[in-house]
Image (cartoon, rainbow, N blue to C red):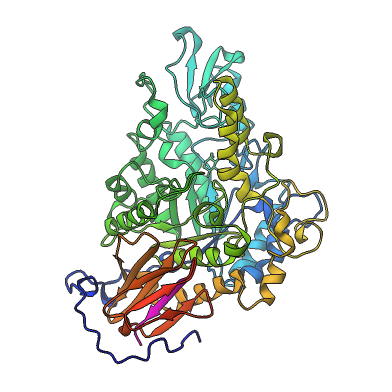
């Protein structure tokens, strides 16, 4: 359908260009592929609080998701990852669970959940649940018991430090207003550990009872028929419970001290043998260790732990002052080559912990928002690895200019981070500049469905303000515009679904020194496609000796493509995939 003839010139081009030469020893062939549904999946991530409200409380709910399942299906995605929907006092929007077998009242009931799941399955959409078990809420029954007395049977479900031993060795907390992960609790004259907020006490994974509880919870959801689990912050779950002193300043590099501690693989192997291996589930842990080797140890099939790595290197690249395309290319190429033969990775540029991808990696000004959003979607959906598409990115949703001052933010990380910066006499203007660029709240503003009041998200007051651009950037408007970001997204999902080369094909970076264009090929058997992405707001040329060989335009985010026999000139943020006819 996207096929059109690109190049009329005589096929004089040869494979003289070394970058196009195939090495038969390394080229992937269809027969060697270990095919899995979760490798072929296109994941759509929904932040339920912000997707669709049906009861007018300004907060999205499960009924809202059910009402939008036909839309989700129309996107061509095949799985949904839902952020936590369990009972929660919402200190961290559901990442503080008070009952793992119940649904948060803001979101609905278990009946709504069961209906949502069966309606998803009726449409061939799989469901991946977020499992938050590095910590629970302090309002979970386990913690209430645990904090009640030193000899309570639940005491060892969490990490406690008795005050008579003196102050515990400093641990850094990501969300604490003072940055301290130990919180003194008067009731038992002890401190408890919380790597995240004070209301998110860390579970003690050394305790076999905790592990059994978690496995039972996983089984509960697996028995309901869910298709996968995303393990929140799990690389932090294992701890050295002697709590040795860490060097001063360790917090600047805390991942080195917190991630992948002894015991983690044992816990994952237990989960795998007790739960994962008994169901056809997709499993992914947030964070992929400190090195590529550690990532392999988590996901290689013979490890019997989880399926795929979800690494942060790429989302850490953009900064308020910009970023370097060379680093971006290098990062994705490094991960691809490390996993070319073994293991599997996730591909994403945004999620609920990031601001909007078009504002961070590309250009959200009016003239470039649409082409640059399409370009990023082309990228995500043409890489090797399971693509994760964050809700709203299929429309090209952008950072929200209404989030100006600290009072406009709802995220605990933003608010407590501000308090900490103030206490430490840091530059608050600089803090706010970074927040306006990168706050998680930008990625959490409500879905833009139509041009009516509150974008059709709610009839009440939305929990976070709608982005004013919803009048033009919305599902309804974009569905009607053949050239919209949304329609381009649908074309890309169809292209990936119908072309195994985009899922399983070898990846090869070409012309890596190019300052504006990210160019790579994907190759599977005789099938080869060339992907050209202009990451800049200027035209950019790309010369290739054997350009003539790529005579089919599989997708183009502009209506035209300027070229000569050996050179293509891409417009600002132009993205094309060319195939060999
Ligand atoms: C990682 C989650 O993605 C994030 O949203 C959450 O705040 C922390 N883990 C704590 O659960």
Residue 267 versus residue 359: which sits nearer the camera? 359
- Asked whether, in this view, residue 527 is left or right of residue 400, the answer is left
Q: What stretch is highlighted in magenta?
A: 575-581
- Identify the image quadrant of residue 185: top right
Q: Which residue is drawn at 58% across and 20% down?
A: 423
Instruction: Give the percent coordinates (x, y) of residue 203.
Output: 49, 32
Question: Is residue 40 highlighted in magenta?
Answer: no
Quadrant where ligand 1 appears: top right
Residue 573 versus residue 396: which sits nearer the camera? 573
52 w.r.t. 486: above or below: above
Q: How many marks?
A: 0
464 w.r.t. 193: above or below: below
Residue 399 versus residue 100: which sits nearer the camera? 399
Instruction: Give the percent coordinates (x, y) of residue 557.
Output: 52, 73
Q: Which image quadrant: the C terminus?
A: bottom left
137 w.r.t. 182: above or below: below
Instruction: Give the percent coordinates (x, y) of residue 228.
Output: 49, 57
Residue 568 versus residue 336: which sits nearer the camera? 568
Prevailing SS of the magenta stretch: strand
């Amino acid at each position: 359908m996207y096929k059109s003839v690109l190049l009329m010139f005589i096929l004089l081009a040869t494979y003289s260009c070394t970058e196009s030469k195939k090495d038969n020893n390394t080229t992937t062939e269809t027969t060697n592929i270990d095919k899995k549904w979760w490798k072929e999946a296109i994941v759509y991530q929904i932040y339920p609080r912000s997707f669709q409200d049906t009861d007018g409380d300004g907060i999205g709910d499960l009924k809202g998701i059910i009402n939008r399942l036909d839309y989700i299906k129309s996107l061509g995605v095949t799985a949904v990852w839902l952020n936590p929907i369990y009972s929660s006092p919402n200190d961290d929007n559901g990442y503080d669970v008070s009952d793992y077998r119940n649904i948060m009242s803001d979101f609905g009931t278990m009946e709504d959940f069961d209906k949502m799941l069966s309606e998803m399955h009726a449409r061939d959409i799989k469901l991946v649940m977020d499992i938050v078990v590095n910590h629970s809420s302090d309002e979970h029954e386990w913690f209430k018991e645990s904090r009640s007395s030193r000899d309570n049977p639940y005491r060892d479900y969490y990490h406690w430090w008795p005050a008579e031993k003196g102050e515990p060795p400093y641990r850094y907390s990501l969300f604490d207003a003072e940055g301290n992960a130990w919180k003194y609790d008067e009731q038992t004259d002890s401190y408890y550990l919380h790597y995240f907020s004070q209301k998110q006490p860390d579970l003690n994974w050394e305790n076999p009872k905790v592990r059994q509880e978690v496995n039972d919870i996983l089984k509960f959801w697996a028995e309901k028929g869910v298709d996968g689990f995303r393990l929140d912050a799990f690389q932090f779950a294992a701890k050295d419970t002697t709590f040795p002193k860490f060097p001063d300043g360790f917090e600047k590099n805390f991942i080195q001290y917190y991630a992948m501690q002894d015991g983690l693989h044992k816990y994952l192997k237990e989960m795998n043998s007790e739960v994962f291996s008994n169901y056809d589930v997709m499993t992914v842990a947030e964070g992929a260790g400190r090195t590529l080797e550690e990532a392999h140890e988590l996901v290689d099939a013979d490890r019997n732990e989880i399926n795929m790595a979800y690494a942060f290197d790429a989302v850490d690249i953009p900064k308020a002052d910009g970023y370097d395309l060379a680093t971006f290319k290098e990062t994705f190429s490094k991960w691809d080559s490390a996993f070319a033969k073994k293991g599997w990775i996730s591909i994403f540029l945004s999620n609920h912990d990031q601001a909007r991808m078009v504002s961070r990696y590309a250009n959200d000004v009016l003239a470039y928002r649409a082409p640059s959003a399409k370009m990023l979607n082309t990228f995500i959906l043409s890489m090797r690895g399971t693509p994760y598409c964050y809700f709203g990115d299929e429309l090209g949703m952008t950072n929200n200019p209404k989030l100006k001052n600290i009072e406009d933010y709802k995220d605990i990380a933003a608010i407590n981070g501000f308090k900490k910066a103030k206490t430490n006499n840091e530059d608050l203007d600089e803090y706010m500049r970074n927040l306006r660029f990168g706050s998680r709240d930008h990625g959490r503003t409500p879905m833009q469905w139509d041009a009516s009041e509150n974008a059709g998200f709610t009839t009440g007051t939305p929990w976070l303000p709608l982005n004013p651009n919803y009048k033009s950037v919305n599902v309804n408007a974009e569905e009607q515009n053949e050239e919209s970001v949304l329609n381009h997204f649908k074309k890309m999902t169809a292209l990936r679904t119908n072309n195994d080369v985009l899922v399983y094909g070898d990846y090869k970076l070409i012309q890596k020194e190019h300052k504006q264009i990210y160019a790579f090929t994907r190759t599977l058997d005789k099938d080869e496609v060339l992907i050209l992405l202009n990451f800049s707001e200027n035209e950019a040329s790309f010369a290739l000796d054997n350009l003539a060989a790529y005579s089919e335009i599989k997708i183009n985010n502009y209506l035209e493509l300027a070229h000569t026999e050996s050179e293509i000139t891409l417009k600002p943020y132009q993205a094309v995939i060319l195939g060999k006819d």
